[in-house]
Image (tube, helix red, strand yellow):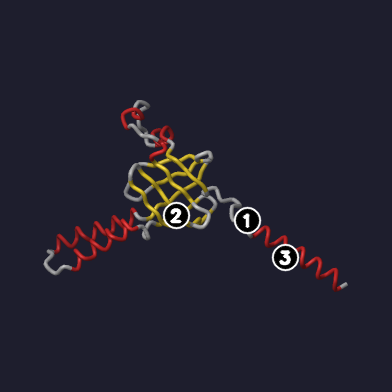
C-alpha cells in the first residue's frame, strides 16, 4: 500500500512540475514582432497612398519579448531595452526605466529641477517634461487576432505589430 501511494505521489509531482514549468503556455507575446504598416494605417484612418509617402520599412520597427522577461525595441536607429510582464493573456506592459537613455534623461531633468535659480514657470515645464518621460517609458501592449497593438499614453495613433516568422 505504501509503495502504491509513493508511486502515485511521484507521478503526480512529476506531472505537476511538467505542467507548471511550461512558461510558454498561453503566452502570445513571446518572440519578435515587426510593425504591420497596412494595419497601422488602416487603424489610424490614413489614406491608402500614405504608405509610399511615409517610407516605412517594417524591419526598422521591431519589438522583442524575451522568455526571461527582457524586452527590447528598435525604432529606426533608436534602441531601447527594458523588462516586460504579462498581466493577462492579452495584456503586457513593457518598462524602459532601466534603459541608459531614459536614466540619463531623468538624471539630467532632476539636476535641472534641483537648481535654485528657476522660476515657478520653468519648474512647471521641467516637471511636465519629467512626467512625459515617465509616461513614455512604460508601454502597454494588447494581443488580439494574432497581432500586438501599442496604444501609448499621449500618442494619438495605434501601432499594430505582426509576428516575425523565423
In the depicted view, which residue is nearer to us: 152 or 85? Answer: 85
Say if 165 sits above or below 90 in the image.
above
Residue 93 position, x and y percent, is 44, 54
In the depicted view, which residue is nearer to us: 83 or 160? Answer: 83
Q: Is residue 68 found left or right of 2 in the rendered image?
A: left
Q: CA distance from mark 3 to mark 2?
A: 33 Å
Q: Nearer the viewer, mark 2 or mark 1?
A: 1
Answer with mark 3 or mark 2, whichever residue precedes in sequence: 3
Q: Check residue 22 in the rendering and tell me which mark sits there, or answer none.
A: 1
Q: Is residue 98 found left or right of 166 in the rendered image?
A: left
Q: Secondary structure at mark 2?
A: strand
Answer with mark 2 or mark 1, whichever residue precedes in sequence: 1
Which residue: 19% across, 58% down? 125
In the depicted view, which residue is nearer to us: 55 or 48? Answer: 55
Residue 135 position, x and y percent, is 33, 55
Which residue does the numbered mark 2 point to in the structure image? 93
Q: Check residue 13 in the rendering and tell me which mark sits there, or answer none.
A: 3
Q: Secondary structure at mark 3?
A: helix
Q: Check residue 94 in the rendering and tell me which mark sits there, or answer none.
A: none
Amino acid at each position: 500500500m505504501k509503495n502504491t501511494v509513493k508511486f502515485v505521489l511521484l507521478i503526480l509531482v512529476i506531472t505537476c512540475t511538467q505542467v507548471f514549468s511550461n512558461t510558454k503556455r498561453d503566452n502570445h507575446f513571446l518572440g519578435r514582432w515587426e510593425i504591420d504598416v497596412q494595419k497601422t494605417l488602416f487603424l489610424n484612418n490614413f489614406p491608402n497612398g500614405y504608405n509610399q509617402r511615409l517610407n516605412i520599412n517594417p524591419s526598422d520597427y521591431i519589438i522583442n519579448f524575451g522568455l526571461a522577461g527582457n524586452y527590447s525595441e528598435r525604432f529606426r536607429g533608436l534602441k531601447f531595452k527594458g523588462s516586460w510582464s504579462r498581466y493577462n493573456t492579452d495584456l503586457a506592459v513593457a518598462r524602459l526605466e532601466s534603459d541608459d537613455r531614459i536614466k540619463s534623461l531623468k538624471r539630467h531633468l532632476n539636476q535641472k529641477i534641483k537648481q535654485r535659480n528657476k522660476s515657478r514657470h520653468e519648474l512647471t515645464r521641467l516637471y511636465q517634461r519629467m512626467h512625459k518621460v515617465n509616461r513614455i517609458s512604460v508601454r502597454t501592449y494588447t494581443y488580439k487576432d494574432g497581432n500586438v497593438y501599442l496604444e501609448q499614453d499621449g500618442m494619438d495613433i495605434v501601432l499594430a505589430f505582426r509576428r516575425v516568422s523565423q
